[in-house]
Amino acid sequence: MLYMVIEHFKEGKAPEIYRRARENGRMLPDGLEYISSWVDLDFKICYQLMQTDDLSLFTVWTKAWRDLVEFEIVPVRTSAEAAYTIAPQL
């Protein structure tokens, strides 16, 4: 399953977030796969596409970052999957 993870950086914490990531990596538990990410120009929000079959792995991962980041985790599907799913209703 794909998830869009929306990270809201806590005020002024972007340098600390990048420092921790440089020193420790993403700290993802086995079974939680990072696919790609995008960061807004003000270093306030990061959008990450991730994949897992075990939603509980997000609890493990976010615990390592929650002092610096507030998370929204949204299940998503590709556009191709969405078109296939909605096709019978067209």
Image (cartoon, rainbow, N blue to C red):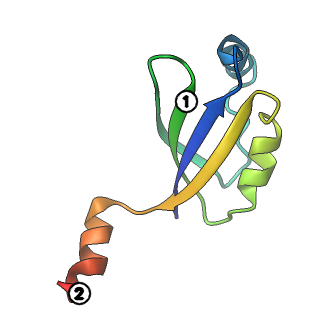
Residue 15's place in the image compared with 9, above or below, is: above
Residue 12's place in the image compared with 44, above or below, is: above
Nearer to us in this view, 7 or 51: 7
Residue matched to label 1: 45
Residue 14's place in the image compared with 30, above or below, is: above
Is 37 left, or right, of 85 in this rendering? right
Residue depicted at x 55% and y 57%: 74
Q: Quadrant of residue 43?
A: top right
Q: Position of residue 71 (x, y in %)?
A: 67, 43
Q: Position of residue 40 (x, y in %)?
A: 46, 24
Q: Earlier in the sequence, mark 2 or mark 1?
A: 1
Of helix, strand and loop, which one carries label 2? helix
User: Which amino acid type corresponds to the residue marked 1 in the rendered image?
Assistant: Ile
Of helix, strand and loop, which one carries label 1? strand
The reply to whether the C-beta atoms of the residues labelled 2 and 1 are less than 8 Å apart is no
Residue depicted at x 21% and y 81%: 87
Q: How many marks?
A: 2
Q: Position of residue 9 (x, y in %)?
A: 65, 27
Residue depicted at x 61% and y 37%: 7
User: Which amino acid type corresponds to the residue marked 2 in the rendered image?
Assistant: Gln
Q: Residue furthest left?
A: 90
Residue matched to label 2: 89
Q: Position of residue 63 (x, y in %)?
A: 82, 42
Quarter occupied by the C terminus: bottom left
Q: Quadrant of residue 27?
A: top right
The residues bearing labels 2 and 1 have C-alpha atoms spaced at a distance of 35 Å
